[in-house]
């Protein structure tokens, strides 16, 4: 029967994790290519993850939309659609969220720690052999290097700009004119709607009934081996 093709994005956006670009792209292609699918729904519940994986999925969604202009792409954010997950969602024609959904976190982070003073207090000697002046960049047991940190900051800023450009391309003039939208803040669904990050306050049922006008839904999500995923994450 005519149906909404649902693809679930649950968990981390990472290679080999629950939202893996290779598997997700294959599922999205199946959802769009299905003759009787009248629209595609991304059912999202994810804190984010890899910007590379998100960019690959985003780019494929843009291509599939152009190839199938008659099929609406709707993103439904459940508990959370943040960071890389929102990157993906911004490719949708419309975004739906609940009032209490967590939405946004448009930013990039590289974190670590420093333990130089600690190893000195413990009487430990750091022995590090490298070829290449920057091979041990951000090593937690070496003193901070301002030039290396500045380099990493420039790289993070560039990735952040790519993220912002993708969101602006997807959301267009629906976005409010506020710089803090791209500051890494996260909002509830109600605030996100005021900022133009989402279009509707609703649910999956609302999306099927009010936006797509169908009752049937078919799950095109990747069928993961959950034991394998759990074992890999535990390891």
Image (cartoon, grey):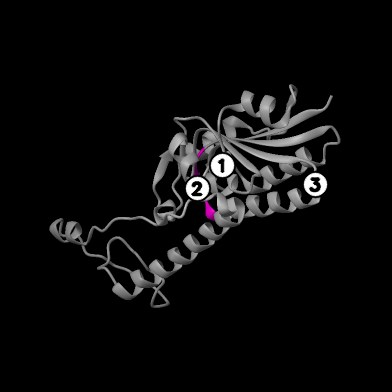
Query: Which residue is identified by label 2?
Result: 49
Pointers 3 and 1 in contact (C-beta within 8 Å): no
Query: Which residue is identified by label 1?
Result: 17
Question: Which element carries disc 2, helix, strand or loop?
Answer: strand
Number of the front mark, 2 or 1: 2
> Depth check: 183 or 47 in front?
183
Q: Overall secondary structure of the magenta stretch?
A: strand
- Whether 132 is drawn above or below 212: the answer is below
Measure how far apart labels 3 and 2 are at the Cα level: 28 Å
Magenta run includes residue 58? no
Q: Position of residue 5 (x, y in %)?
A: 73, 33
- Whether 7 is drawn above or below 135: the answer is above
Question: Which element carries disc 3, helix, strand or loop?
Answer: loop
- Magenta range is 46-51
Q: Earlier in the sequence, mark 3 or mark 1?
A: 1
Query: Which residue is identified by label 3?
Result: 68
Query: Tag on residue 114?
Result: none
Q: Is residue 219 visible?
A: no
Quadrant in the picture for residue 96: top right
Question: Which element carries disc 1, helix, strand or loop?
Answer: loop
Q: Mark 3, residues whose alpha carbon is within 10 Å: few (<14), some, or many (≥20)?
A: few
Q: Earlier in the sequence, mark 2 or mark 1?
A: 1
> Depth check: 24 or 71 in front?
71
């Amino acid at each position: 029967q005519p149906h909404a093709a649902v693809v679930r994005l649950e968990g981390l956006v990472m290679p080999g994790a629950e939202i893996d670009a290779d598997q997700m792209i294959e599922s999205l292609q199946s959802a769009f290519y299905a003759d009787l699918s009248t629209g595609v729904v991304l059912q999202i519940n994810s804190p984010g993850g890899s910007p590379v994986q998100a960019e690959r999925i985003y780019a494929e969604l843009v291509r599939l939309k152009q190839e199938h202009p008659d099929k609406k792409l709707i993103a439904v954010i459940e508990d959370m659609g943040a960071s890389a997950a929102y990157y993906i969602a911004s490719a949708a024609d419309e975004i739906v969220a609940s009032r209490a959904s967590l939405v946004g976190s448009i930013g990039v982070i590289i974190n670590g720690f420093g333990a130089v003073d600690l190893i000195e207090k413990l009487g430990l000697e750091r022995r590090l052999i490298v070829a290449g002046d920057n091979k041990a960049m951000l090593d937690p047991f070496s003193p901070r290097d301002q030039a290396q940190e500045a380099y990493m900051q420039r790289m993070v800023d560039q990735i952040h700009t790519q993220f912002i450009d993708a969101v602006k391309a997807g959301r267009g003039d629906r976005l409010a004119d506020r710089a803090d939208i791209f500051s890494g803040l996260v909002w509830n669904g109600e605030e996100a709607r005021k900022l133009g990050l989402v279009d509707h306050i609703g649910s999956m049922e609302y999306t099927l009934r009010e936006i797509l006008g169908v009752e049937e839904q078919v799950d095109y999500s990747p069928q993961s081996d959950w034991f394998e995923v759990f074992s890999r994450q535990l390891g």
